[in-house]
Image (tube, helix red, strand yellow):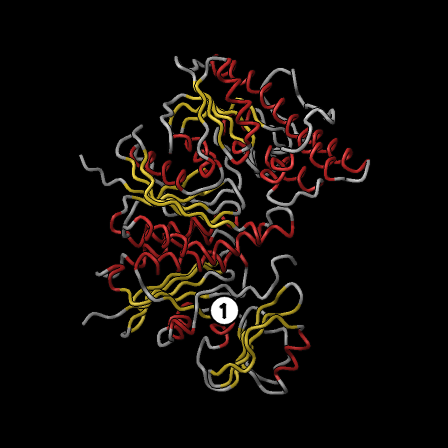
Amino acid sequence: MESKSILLGIETSCDETAAALVRLAAPDGPAEILADVVLSQFAAHAPYAGVVPEIAARAHVEAVDTVIAAAMREAGIGFADLSGVAATAGPGLIGGVLVGLLTGKAIALARGLPLLAINHLEAHALSPRLAAHAPFPYLLLLASGGHCQFLAVEGVGRARRLGSTIDDAAGEAFDKAAKVLGLGFPGGPALELAAQSGDPGAFALPRPLLGRPGCDFSFAGLKTALARAAQMEPLTHQRQADLAASFQAAVSDVVLDRTANAMAAFEARGGGAAPLLVAAGGVAANGVLRAGLSQFAAQRGYDFVVPPKRYCTDNAAMVALVGAERLQLGLIDGLDAPARPRWPLDSEAAAAHPTHVPGRKGAKA
Amino acid sequence: MPDRLILAIETNLARCSAALVGESGVLAQESVTLQRGHAELLAPMVQGLMARVPLGFEGLARVAVTTGPGSFTGVRVGLAFARGLALALSLPIIGVSSLEVLALADGESGWRAGIIPSAEGVFFALYEDGQTRVAPARLKPEEAQAALAGRAVRLTGPGAALLDNHGGAQIVSDAPCVLALARLAGPRDPSCAPAAPLYLRAALA
């Protein structure tokens, strides 16, 4: 049967302006990526060694329509070929989210298409299904610049948060570490590169929460210890490399320790006969972490899937995929769908155990 | 020959407005006063307008939108939505500054200015018989005052009472009029009126 289910995905929640076209023949079926365009704003933010929300929002509104047009051209299709429009509606930097969501609403309205307002975390959670067979349920480590959490992903719209960071996200820690080491932005790839010529045992950096019960994360103490170590002596090239390698080793140790506890929690929920561990988000692109997780998963009898790098970082193919899956389940949103700076994937767990101090706006993630 | 319609969208300040205007006049319009929530209201509002004309989106000839200055978010909501419509329908899109729409709200004859209070001073633009004399800019109040040069300029906008305009009219209004936007955008060449944001303030204040 020829399926016409082609979704336009739009992603503008951080510093990538992205559009993609994805065809999903059947629920749980293989996704066909017809186009996947990502315009990084990295150069605009580099002078500030971090993403500046207003700069990001300005860049999105100047670019998103041309990025969508480029994706349509790449796929060789027209708006009449679409079955729906999926746009990230949060969580993220609200100025940028609004741009993508409003553009998506306009296209959906103008072409009489269903709108799907997508949770960016769910997009990351389902991203392994873009390139690999990843049947539900699976254990997901979502580690990015904005998030660091374990989720039991049991279906579309059904993810249970098992643990989360109590301070910084892993990618945030990488960015800040790279900044104190003078390695540039974005910090993850720069730090990984520097660490290649360093000794991971050169500095005994702390491993927050190591050996403690549960699968929450903490990176603030590690970040502070690194900053202190970096300031103690002049930062030679070798010292920079050694600190980078030591930092990366500490993160890796913590992640593996937390993963062991997350596996126990996942198995307690029923787990799955052939358990699957998935790592997604920008930090999953780190080679040392991937290798460590792969080995650890094999030891524990888990299959291990990491999306290809381009689907680990922010992209619109994952947004289109969630849109396609939600459309097949009839989970359509109204044209009044709000943009949400905070939008936990598992709102129940986030409300019951707020690991970020929730504040008056509610839990972040 | 059916009317060729303009869809005009205005979300720069404390209103969310949309109108459908054809050669024979205004076919439909909506305007809601609000401080926030433009992003939730705009798409259903336009959906409601389009449902009132038989051809729907197929009857549209162009899209018009205010480009700022105004609230950063409001400016982007209108532009992102209008540009999305233009892309999906392959329509020309025309951007007009909020200040020009304010200044020329009820006509173009004589000296007219649009004025909006800003964090440090005023957003200001001045026109004579519809021709730009001072292009949209962020000015100190005394600079805007000096630009009036003793003339009885007709002042329109949220900041209309901020200057001494030598006996000219002061029309305090909360937001640009969407019908004035449609009127100004109707004859304009899209290549000379890009739908690009006009913030008039740096991203990092």
Circle 1 packing at 10 Å, graded few (<14), some (14-19), many (20+), is many
Relative placement, left or right, of B87 versus A238 is left
Relative placement, left or right, of B185 versus A210 is left
In-front residue for pair A184/A120: A184
In-front residue for pair A312/B156: A312
The correct choice, above or below, for A287 with respect to A261 in the image is: below
Q: Quadrant of the N terminus of chain A?
A: top left
Q: Quadrant of the C terminus of chain A?
A: top right
Q: Give the residue at mark 1.
A: B98
Relative placement, left or right, of B127 versus A321 is right
The correct choice, above or below, for A237 with respect to B21 in the image is: above
In this orientation, does residue A219 appear? Answer: yes
Seen at 50% across and 58% down, the residue is: B74
Residue A93 % position (x, y): 54, 45
Q: Which chain carries label 1?
A: B
Residue A161 % position (x, y): 50, 25
In-front residue for pair B46/A185: A185
Dividing the picture into quarters, in which one does residue B155 lie?
bottom right
Seen at 33% across and 50% down, the residue is: A74
The correct choice, above or below, for B205 with respect to B122 in the image is: above
